[in-house]
Amino acid sequence: MSLYSPEPDDVFAWIDDAERAREQAGLVRTLRPRPASSPLLDLASNDYLGLSRHPETVRGAREAAERWGAGATGSRLVTGTTELHAELERELAAFCGFEAALVLSSGYAANLAAVTALSDRGTLVVSDAGNHASIVDGCRLSRAGIEVIPHSDPQAARKALATHEGRALLVSDSVFSVDGDAAPLAAYAAACREAGAALVVDDAHGLGVLGEGGRGALHAAGLAGAPGVVATLTLSKSLGSQGGAVLGPAKVIRHLVNTARTFIFDTGLAPAAAGAALAGLRLLRREPERAERAREVADRLYGRLTASGLTAARPDAAVVSVRAPSASAALRWAADCREAGLSVGCFRPPSVPDGISRLRLTARADLTGDEIDRAVETILGTAPAGATDR
């Protein structure tokens, strides 16, 4: 007699219930392929400096692909490390003010690498409640003891670290992706020094926008290169490419090479992405005014929108977050903006930790005054009932 038990007619029937629940809550997400050339004014991407289509960045990708091939061909520890990767790592570390750097296939992988490789079962990881999902997942995978503290609360961090004997680290975004507010890095660093803990900071939204010439939030806070500080970042925002990196003391980077699973067991970053990132980095170094321009655009958007009655978080970098009355209203608002020729981000639960839905605007350095005017007029003209306080 066969021991095989036939499967039910539909083992994924539970997905139908989950889909219905999402629809009722206004939380359905869909993929929307964009054409190579779009008539929409883009305030939705993370292309803060407008480099993803810059001729120099594109040329960097093309030349790297032609020289090194379309793929890295293997793990970084086998065949996936090229001279180009090493060159990018040297220049990233020097630009941001750290001793060494390690390039990975994404910023997500970089956060998983840093958190999991620098902690174990006996470690305490203190995590800001506003942290990105990649940090949250790194904490879950680390097997460490995790304590989530209230958002941007140095006193809570100090208290949590003081209760632990042994290895500890505090992990935080530098600029939080939902509201665009900056973490209290100096205070977090002080709490870490008092407790003998490490500070790990995801500078994905700070690189290219904050610090001297866009060198990042840690550079701006005077923490770049500090012995107890590690930075992670992405190459997919200000540098207009793809990939991620971990920066810190050389011994930390050597440790990650030997222990970080998302580095050891992943194919190396494609040469085209490394070449584009290197070209974007060199362009930023040559044109540091792009960082200041991104911040100026954010301030203008925030000032114009709040002066007209919308509720928005004051931007500390290049993210402008505008609150919506509900998840469904945010979705409709974003769709109406799109129909009017403007692409904006739409953040709803579970992407927002406080449950408040928002439009998320990217203040790109290459936006003109006319484009800023057009964006503001479109957002105001499509605002749903209850979005303004007037």
Image (cartoon, rainbow, N blue to C red):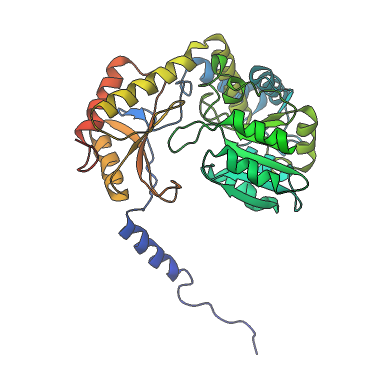
Q: Nearer the viewer, residue 379 or 225?
A: 225
Looking at the image, residue 49 sits to the left or right of residue 227; the answer is left
Any part of residue 102 in sight: no
Which residue is painted at 62% across and 50% down in the image? 147
Q: Position of residue 72 (x, y in %)?
A: 67, 33
Name which residue lies at 69% across and 26% down: 85
Q: Residue at x 70, y 49 (%)?
A: 163
Tell which of 207 and 279 is nearer to you: 207
**Residue 226 falls left or right of residue 131:** right
Q: Is residue 85 visible?
A: yes
Instruction: Left or right? Give the position of 127 relative to 310.
Output: right
**Compared with residue 91, is residue 184 higher up or lower down, i.e. above or below?**
below
The percent coordinates of residue 33 (x first, y second) are 39, 40
Quadrant in which the N terminus appears: bottom right
Label count reads: 0
Residue 267: image x %, image y %? 68, 40
Q: Which residue is at the far top?
A: 286
Residue depicted at 63% across the width and 36% down the height:
105
Left or right, 262 with reference to 272: right
* Front-lying residue, 60 or 250: 250
In x, y percent, where is residue 366? 40, 17
**Quadrant of the image containing the C terminus:** top left
In the displayed structure, would residue 59 be above or below residue 12?
Answer: above
